[in-house]
Amino acid sequence: MTALPMSEHVPVIDVRNLSVHYGEVLALDDVTLSLAPGRICGLIGVNGSGKSTLFTSLMGLLVPQAGSVELFGTSTASARRGGLVAYMPQAESVDWTFPVSVSDVVAMGVYGQLGPARRLKAAHRAAVDEALERVGLTGLRKRQIGQLSGGQRKRVFIARSIAQDARLLLLDEPFAGVDRTSERTMTALLKDLRDEGRSVLVSTHDLAGVPELCDEAILLHRRVLAQGEPSQVLTHGNLALAFGPVPPGTPAAAAAAPPFSPLSPAASDGGS
Ligand SMILES: Nc1ncnc2c1ncn2[C@@H]1O[C@H](COP(=O)(O)OP(=O)(O)OP(=O)(O)O)[C@@H](O)[C@H]1O
Ligand SMILES: [Mg+2]
C-alpha cells in the first residue's frame, strides 16, 4: 500500500537529540534512540518520565525544541501519509463518548487507502472483518466504543492498526487496566504481528511482562537511561535509577535481572 521504500537496514524509528519542553517543564532531554524493523520494544519509566511525550513526538503531534525524528528513513508526516504508522493513545486522552461503532473505528484504518469518495470496497471490508476477527471483537462490531470494557477498547485500536496494515505500532499503555488473561492474549497477538515483520513500541508499567513480550527495552526518565535486551536494561541498578530503590518482593524486583554476585543464591540456581 505504500510507495515508500522499506529496508531491513533502515531503522523504523530514528530519534536524535530530541528535547521537548511544555513551557517551563522539560519533558524530554536530549533523547537519542532507534528501533530496527521486526522488533518489539518496551518503553518503561515512572509517571511523568516522558513516555507519552515521546509517542506524540513520534506522531509529529508536537514540535520539538531540538533534535529530529525520522520513521522509516523519512519524516513523520510522510510515514503517516503512507499509512506506515498506527498510534494507540493513552486511554485517558481518548474521547470514548464519540458516536462511532467498533467497526467504524477499525475502518478508519483503511481510510488512507480510499479514494476521494471514501467508499469502502470489498477488499477494505474484508480487511476490517479480518482485523476484528484477529482481536476477537467480531461479535461486538456494532457497539459504540464507549460501551466496551477497557481491555476491549485497546483491542479496537490494535484491530485498526491491523486493518491499516501499519508497519509500526505505537502503543501507549495498552495493558493498563487489562486483566492477566487479556494481557496474555494481547501479548501473543503483538508477537504474531512482530513475526509478520511489523515493529512495536509499547509503553508499560508491567515490568514483569517485559521479558516475555519485548525483544528490547528502553528505560526513560526524561533522558534514555538504558536501551538494549530486557535482561540488560532491567537490572536492579537501572531500575533504581528510574524508579528509586526496588523493594524486594515487588513485580519490579521480580522483573529485574539479579545483580551479579558470586554469593547471591541466584548465581547458583541458573539465574542469569
Ligand atoms: N500538555 C502538557 N502541558 C504541560 N506539561 C505537560 C503536558 N503533558 C505532559 N506534561 C509534563 O511533561 C512530563 C512528561 O509527561 P508524559 O505525559 O510524557 O509522561 P508519561 O511518562 O507518559 O507519564 P504517565 O506514566 O503518567 O503516562 C510530565 O512532567 C508532565 O507533567
Ligand atoms: Mg503517559
Image (tube, helix red, strand yellow):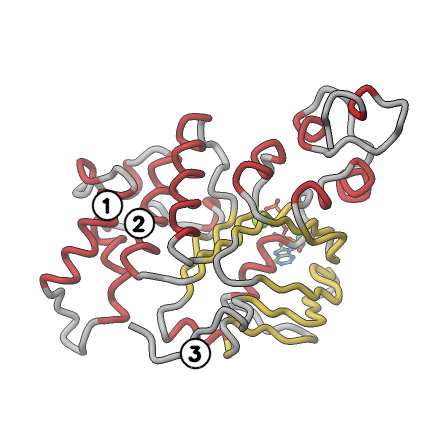
Which residue position is annotated with label 1?
132
In what element is the residue under mark 3? helix
Vertical placement of residue 96 versus 13, above or below: above
Q: Position of residue 5 (x, y in %)?
A: 41, 79
Place of residue 190 in the rendered image (x, y in percent of width and height, measured from the top left): 42, 45
Element assignment for label 2: helix
Kindly identify which numbered label has been placed on residue 89.
none
- Amino acid type assigned to the residue bearing label 3 in the image: Ser
| Image position of 241 with respect to 149: above or below | below
- Contact, mark 2 vs mark 1 (Cβ under 8 Å): yes
Give yes or no for contact between labels 2 and 3 (Cβ–Cβ under 8 Å). no
Which comes before the other along the chain, label 3 or label 1?
Answer: 3
Asked where in the image residue 44 lies, by quadrant, the reply is: top right
Question: Image quadrant of residue 151?
Answer: top left
Using a 10 Å C-alpha cutoff, classify the residue at mark 1 as few (fewer than 14 neighbours), some (14 to 19) or many (20 or more).
many
> Which of the pair 123/138 is nearer the observer?
123
> Which is nearer the N-term, disc 2 or disc 1?
1
Q: Which residue is mark 3?
A: 78
- The x and y percentages for residue 42 are 58, 47
The quarter of the rendered structure image containing the N terminus is: bottom left
Image point (49%, 69%), residue name? 8
- Relative to 82, is 66 on the left or the right? right
Could you tell me the amino acid type at mark 2? Answer: Ala
- Name which residue lies at 54% across and 36% down: 212
Work out how far the residue at label 2 is from the one at label 1, CA to CA, in angstroms. Answer: 6 Å
Looking at the image, is 209 positioned above or below residue 124? above
Q: Position of residue 89 (x, y in %)?
A: 46, 52
Q: Which residue is mark 2?
A: 159
The CA distance from mark 2 to mark 3 is 22 Å
The amino acid sitting under disc 1 is: Leu
